[in-house]
Image (cartoon, rainbow, N blue to C red):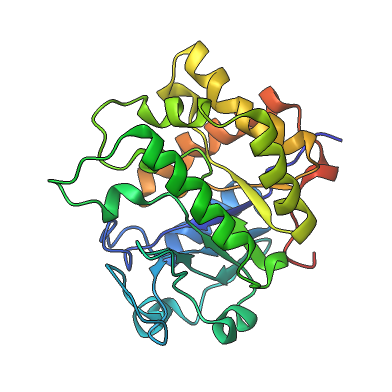
């Protein structure tokens, strides 16, 4: 059976500073879920655990938990999670204690564009090294992988502050298939989900195929996927959902390949 996009496991609210839009609130997000037949939605505002040293940008639990208690729909269940970052020392910004308490959260290894100073200049080889190092750090972290999503594996931010819009694709191209197989193989062995939030309309045909190569390798490794708009504003929800549906078709994903962190 074809993969059913009955969830959105990575959405921001106005509590994320890069949103700060009062219309992006739990009630409006729930309406989106009900209107699109979603069974599960996770609010994943940017976060750094107050008990973990090394915060470089984000707010703590006291701030993002202002969404609680979450509204619930007739058909849509809402959950609170978070988007956890890594700092430049490769520290993951969540404690094991909090990770165990949450139902689900996503970890970003490629927000390098946020952490680079404007005057810093690194080449693509350096960003490739950082990408793989951060991925390895996550795989070695011992966190509860069955409730972790690997956020936007092909996100532009992995190219840091490099100026060209396709630098991130060049970096991905420089990683051999064999290396991706090693990393995705371990990602699947540990039970971590892989996020799909690619927007095909942002790429030409050849560049999109270069991006999809990464997900095809993940599928070959047996990885399980989930859909995520990563929406920061209401206007993102519909178009990004359509983009995910296109990618599901392009990859030929089935229900057996779906990541399921929640008991239905």
At which x and y percent is residue 13? 38, 62
- Closer to us: 23 or 89: 89
Relative to 235, 200 lies left or right: right
Quarter residue 215 falls in: top right
The number of callouts visible is 0
Relative to 5, 211 lies left or right: left
* Depicted 83 relative to depicted 126: above or below: below
- Closer to us: 1 or 51: 51
At which x and y percent is residue 237? 45, 44
Relative to 177, 55 lies left or right: left
Relative to 181, 101 lies left or right: left
Quarter residue 24 falls in: bottom left
Q: Residue at 43% across / 25% down in the picture?
A: 170
- Residue extending farthest left: 119
Q: Is residue 229 visible?
A: no
Which image quarter holds the N terminus?
A: top right
* Depicted 125 relative to depicted 105: above or below: above
* Depicted 211 relative to depicted 156: above or below: above
Quarter residue 144 falls in: bottom right
At which x and y percent is residue 74? 66, 65
Q: Residue at 58% across / 56% down in the picture?
A: 136
Q: Is residue 145 visible?
A: yes
Which image quarter holds the C terminus?
A: bottom right
Q: Residue at 47% across / 54% down in the picture?
A: 109
Q: Residue at 32% across / 26% down in the picture?
A: 165
């Amino acid at each position: 059976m074809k993969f059913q996009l009955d969830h959105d496991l990575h959405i921001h609210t106005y509590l994320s500073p890069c949103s700060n839009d009062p219309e992006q609130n739990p009630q409006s997000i729930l309406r989106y879920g009900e209107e699109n037949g979603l069974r599960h939605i996770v609010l994943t505002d940017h976060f750094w655990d107050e008990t973990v040293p090394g915060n470089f940008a984000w707010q703590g639990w006291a701030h993002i938990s202002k969404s609680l208690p979450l509204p619930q729909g007739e058909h849509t269940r809402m959950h609170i999670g978070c988007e956890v970052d890594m700092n430049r020392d490769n520290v993951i910004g969540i404690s094991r204690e909090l990770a165990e308490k949450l139902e689900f959260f996503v970890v970003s290894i490629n927000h390098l564009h946020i952490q680079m100073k404007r005057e810093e200049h690194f080449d693509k080889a350096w960003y490739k090294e950082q990408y793989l190092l951060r991925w390895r750090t996550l795989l070695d972290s011992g966190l509860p992988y069955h409730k972790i999503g690997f956020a936007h594996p092909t996100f532009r931010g992995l190219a840091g502050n490099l100026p060209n819009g396709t630098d991130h694709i060049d970096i991905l191209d420089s990683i051999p298939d064999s290396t991706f197989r090693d990393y995705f193989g371990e990602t699947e062995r540990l039970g971590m989900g892989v996020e799909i939030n690619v927007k095909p309309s942002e790429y030409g045909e050849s560049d999109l195929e270069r991006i999809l190569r990464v997900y095809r390798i993940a599928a070959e490794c047996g990885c399980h996927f989930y859909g995520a708009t990563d929406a920061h504003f209401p206007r993102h929800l519909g178009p990004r959902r359509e983009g995910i549906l296109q990618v599901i078709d392009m990859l030929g994903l089935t229900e057996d390949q779906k990541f399921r962190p929640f008991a239905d």
